[in-house]
């Protein structure tokens, strides 16, 4: 049986993750270790472990950070109260919140200022959702699943808007919005897509490979929302099985029995070397032919946080590179 791999593109790092990881790396170079990071900078266990070896210290709360130290806020965003708390502890802060998460925060703040009830579609307890809800806790209602739509109470059914976590399933979110609109016909849409370009593109690509593969392997961590969504989307679009693995060594040989075509992709927080490790591993089982499937191309880049750019420029001026 000829065996081959369909490799999805785009996959792996998005612009927001790339920016957040570089923020920690450059902060370590500029200020020296330790650099404190509130929560996992991105939801990938290998990225976090590598940054720890370079001198990053991951904490759950601002209180764990010594006064005067440098603290980076993760790509998932924070509630305004966290920023205020960091200021009272006299911390130097660098905000690595993805600009596309910040966009949702601003939408929430604006709708709240205009007196809307906001229905935030997202997963309870996810750091991004916690941060967004912190922008306007009195105005935001979490919608975690279509069932919730029936029970939500709002101040004025004619003044309701919906927003979404950036890493949800596009199709599921639209289904939830349809339910919400049945209940609130005057429901106002966000000014632009909240589900980010990277989430949408990775789901488009996984749909293509899932339709042509008997098995889909998604590389990503279990707490990565967009990675888990890729597994779900793959299962809904034709493949017989789809699994999430952090590393090639988690692939179970039994998954490969009777399989001739495997689709491979990775979540937005996954370094490419982990995907390459999966390809090397699968080649040992005869999956040597790799076909690239690229339904969408990406060119998005985000600049580093302003506060870091400023200090990087000063450091470069103080220690100019010399040439011989
Ligand atoms: Fe930003 Fe989207 Fe990447 Fe999240 S998945 S960091 S919102 S680009």
Image (tube, rainbow, N blue to C red):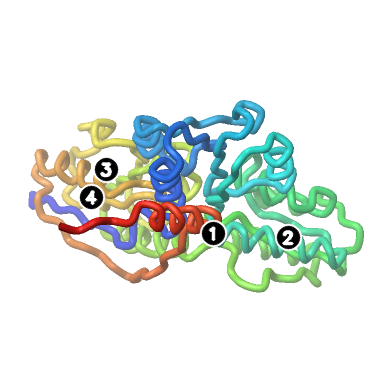
Q: Under 8 Å from ligand 1: the CB of mark 2?
A: no
Residue at 57% x, 44% y is: 73
* Viewer-side residue, 254 vs 275: 275
Residue at 23% x, 50% y is: 262
Q: CA distance from mark 3 to mark 1?
A: 30 Å
* Label 3 vs label 1, nearer the camera: 1
Asked if the residue at tag 2 contacts the one at tag 3, i.e. Cβ–Cβ closer than 8 Å, the answer is no
The disc at residue 306 is: 1
| Nearer-N-terminus badge (4/2) | 2
| Nearer-N-terminus badge (4/1) | 4
| Nearer-N-terminus badge (3/1) | 3
How dense is the environment of label 1, judged by Cα within 10 Å: few (below 14), some, or many (20 and up)? few
Residue at 24% x, 36% y is: 248
How dense is the environment of label 2, judged by Cα within 10 Å: few (below 14), some, or many (20 and up)? many
Q: CA distance from mark 3 to mark 2?
A: 36 Å
* Label 4 vs label 2, nearer the camera: 2
Q: Position of residue 186 (x, y in %)?
A: 81, 72
Q: Secondary structure at mark 3?
A: helix
How dense is the environment of label 4, judged by Cα within 10 Å: few (below 14), some, or many (20 and up)? many
Residue 56 lies in quadrant: top left
Q: Secondary structure at mark 1?
A: helix
| Nearer-N-terminus badge (3/4) | 4
Q: Is residue 70 left or right of residue 151?
A: left
| Nearer-N-terminus badge (1/2) | 2
The C terminus sits in image quarter = bottom left
* Viewer-side residue, 25 vs 227: 25
User: What residue did someone put label 2 on?
Assistant: 108
Q: Position of residue 32 (x, y in %)?
A: 42, 37
User: What residue did someone put label 4 on?
Assistant: 262
Q: Secondary structure at mark 2?
A: helix
User: What residue did someone put label 3 on?
Assistant: 274
């Amino acid at each position: 049986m000829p065996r081959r791999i369909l490799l999805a593109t785009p996959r792996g790092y998005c612009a927001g993750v790339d920016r957040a990881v570089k923020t920690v790396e450059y902060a370590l170079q500029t200020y020296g270790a330790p650099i404190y990071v509130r929560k996992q900078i991105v939801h990938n266990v290998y990225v976090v472990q590598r940054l720890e070896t370079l001198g990053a210290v991951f904490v759950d709360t601002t209180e764990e950070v010594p006064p005067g130290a440098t603290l980076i806020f993760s790509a998932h965003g924070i509630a305004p109260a966290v920023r205020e708390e960091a200021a009272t502890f006299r911390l130097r802060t660098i905000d690595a919140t993805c600009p596309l998460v910040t966009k949702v925060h601003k939408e929430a703040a604006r709708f709240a200022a205009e007196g809307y009830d906001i229905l935030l579609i997202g997963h309870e307890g996810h750091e991004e959702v916690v941060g967004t809800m912190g922008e306007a806790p009195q105005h935001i209602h979490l919608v975690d699943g279509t069932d919730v739509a029936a029970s939500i109470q709002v101040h004025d059914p004619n003044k309701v808007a919906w927003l979404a976590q950036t890493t949800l399933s596009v199709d599921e979110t639209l289904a939830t919005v349809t339910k919400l609109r049945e209940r609130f016909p005057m429901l106002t849409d966000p000014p632009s897509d909240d589900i980010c370009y990277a989430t949408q593109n990775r789901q488009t690509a996984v749909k293509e490979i899932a339709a042509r593969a008997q098995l889909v392997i998604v590389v990503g961590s279990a707490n990565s929302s967009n990675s888990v969504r890729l597994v779900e989307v793959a299962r809904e679009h034709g493949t017989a099985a789809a699994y999430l693995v952090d590393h090639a060594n988690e692939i179970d040989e039994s998954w490969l029995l009777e399989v001739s075509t495997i689709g491979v992709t990775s979540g937005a927080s996954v370094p490419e070397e982990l995907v390459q490790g999966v390809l090397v591993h699968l080649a040992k089982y005869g999956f040597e032919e790799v076909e690239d499937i690229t339904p969408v191309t990406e060119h998005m880049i985000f600049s580093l946080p302003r506060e870091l750019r400023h200090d990087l420029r000063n450091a470069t001026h103080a220690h100019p590179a010399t040439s011989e």
